[in-house]
Image (cartoon, rainbow, N blue to C red):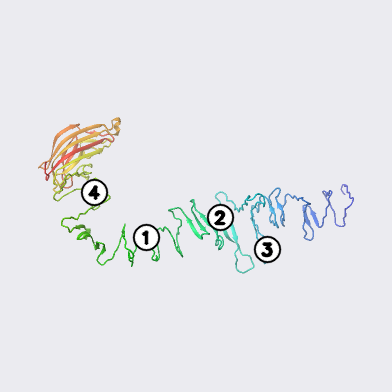
Amino acid sequence: MGTARDFHVKTGLVVDGGNVTLSNGNLLVNSGHIDIDNIKIDGQTISTVAGDENINITPDGTGTVVISKVDINDGAVDGTVIGGTTPAAISSTTLSVSSTSTLTGAISTGGSTADTTITQVNSAANSAGRTLTLQSGSPPTGGTANTGVGGNLILASGKGKGTAAGGSILFKVADGGSTGSTLNPLATALTIADDKSLAIAGVTSFGVDDAGVDVIFYGDAAGDKMQWDTSANRLVITGTDSTTALEIADGNVTVADTLTATNIGAFQATGAIDFNTQAMTNVDINSGAIDDTTIGANGAAAGTFSEVVAVTVDAVTDFTVGSTVITDDVITFTPSTSDTVTLTAAANAEFTIATIDDGVSTAGHINLQADGNVRLKYSSATRLETKSTGVDVTGHLEGSTSIHSAHARMRASNGIEDGDGYGSAGSHPIIDIDGSNFYTSETLAVSEVSGKSKVPGGNYGTNGTDIGNVTILNLNVNNASFDTYQAVEAFCALSIKKGSTAGTDAGDLEYRVVNKVYGVFNKAGGIDTIVQFESGDVNIGHFHWVLADGGLGTNNDTMSLVFKYTSKITHGSNAETTYSVNCNGLSLSGGGG
């Protein structure tokens, strides 16, 4: 035997059978007792040995059982606060909680390689399943009135990391199936996805029959929404003015009862529309047909066609409105007895406006009055146009006998040569008054290009390289279709001002030439120039008359007034050259004087 030990027993030690063995360690009982019935303590295990009996640990009074590092693998935790003093993690493969239990603090389930399922225990055979309730916290009863809001119930799916999506929240139900004793499978009824979208798999109801609820769908713009108003039993769409609030991309819209709309935009009907003899006001019919219909049956009124693309009125011979008769290609107006105005269209699109007045002393005038201008066109080009300042004529104004006027003031905006010279494709207009002499005043203003020169004997033009002759105006001298001129008097002036590169001298007069010259178309078909007066910088050039073959076209020669440079002049930037002339001309048919 080993070393001797003290063994003290005063009273109370009874061993009727079995063994009391302490091979190592201590068994100490201080002022207490051990009463063990079918309890086995073997190493780190406490268990019962018979009768499927429970092991109960019950403290006295208000005392508690403090167990640290607990691993509960099976059984039930009843009527217990877990984590009441110091919350800590609970790890359990299977946790069964009966009656009412309180869990305090964070509860983590499952593991890194295992999912977790919380399931209500199945009911007894042939009875309905039991309810599982998840409820957030409420404030206690009592205390100050109307204080303390309920806690939120938060269902959150797992988070995604980076660009990875988070988990969805799935709500599943099991609908009734065919006859049988096995459980029906679960199916997802509602899915809340990671992008906050909501997918409902079945029919969705809000409220119940005869007890509805308001349902509102809000838009991004303030005040915009779609609302089912349960008290009014109607769907109200509130959108932004002048924008589309309801759009049917495809399919049909059926209204069983009355459709009321204060403003209907464009639409296309695919079937007959019966207006049930209801009044239609402010109607604009742009196409289609009106068949078997009496217009103005209950009360004729004025009709206005603001824009007519195509109107067909079938009549046996004519269409009559008051005193106006429309027949084929003719419209006849009879504003007074025997006095008519006719609009007649003939072959080759010839069109005639005629007035016939039955009175012997009254003329039927044709008045053209426009809020803007009245234009007479040949093809698409305007030849005559009225303006607030008078009448503009583009082209030749010709008369078979004569044109009379107490005073004629005629201008031609292109009456000055400003092209590449006579004989070119440029315009060479004149002012021409048939059967009379003429007077005109012309001005040609040229903004010179820096470095370009006027040189003696150079080309015809106004502003270019090596220009030596500038044409001011042209007079016809040998075409009998309009006036031909035999003599002309011209009082002329040239002025050249310094341009923007001249610094403080910009705008100063650099050159001036003044001439008075006569041009005569002689009997040999040439042009004689007579200089009556000259002044200024006459060394740089002079005005004179020259003959231009075909100046107004083939076989239309002109007597042209030209400034001829006799010295080279190089212009600075934006130098201003002005050619001014007053002319008196004598035509072959003129009255002289």
Mark 4 crowdedness (10 Å alpha carbons): few <14, some 14-19, many ≥20: some
Residue at 26% across, 62% down: 322
What residue occupies the far left of the structure in this picture? 523
- Tell me the mark number nearer the camera, choosing from 2 and 4: 4
Q: How many labels does the image show?
A: 4
Badge 1 element: loop
What residue occupies the far right of the structure in this picture? 10
Q: Are marks 4 and 1 in contact (CB under 8 Å)?
A: no
Q: Name the residue under label 4.
A: 386
Residue 1 placement, left or right of 304: right
Choose between 65 and 553: the one closer to the eye: 65
Disc number placed over residue 281 in the picture, else none: 1
Marked residue nearer the N-terminal end (1 or 2) = 2
Choose between 39 and 262: the one closer to the eye: 262
Choose between 572 and 113: the one closer to the eye: 572
Q: Mark 3 points at which residue?
A: 123
- Tell me the mark number nearer the camera, choosing from 4 and 1: 1
Amino acid of disc 3? Ser
Q: Are marks 2 and 3 in contact (CB under 8 Å)?
A: no
Q: How far apart are marks 1 and 3 (CA)?
A: 73 Å
Q: Distance between the residues labelled 4 and 3?
A: 104 Å
Amino acid of disc 1? Thr
State which quadrant residue 509 falls in.
top left
Marked residue nearer the N-terminal end (4 or 1) = 1
Badge 2 element: loop
The answer to whether residue 397 shows anywhere in this view is yes
Marked residue nearer the N-terminal end (2 or 3) = 3
Q: How far apart are marks 2 and 4 (CA)?
A: 75 Å
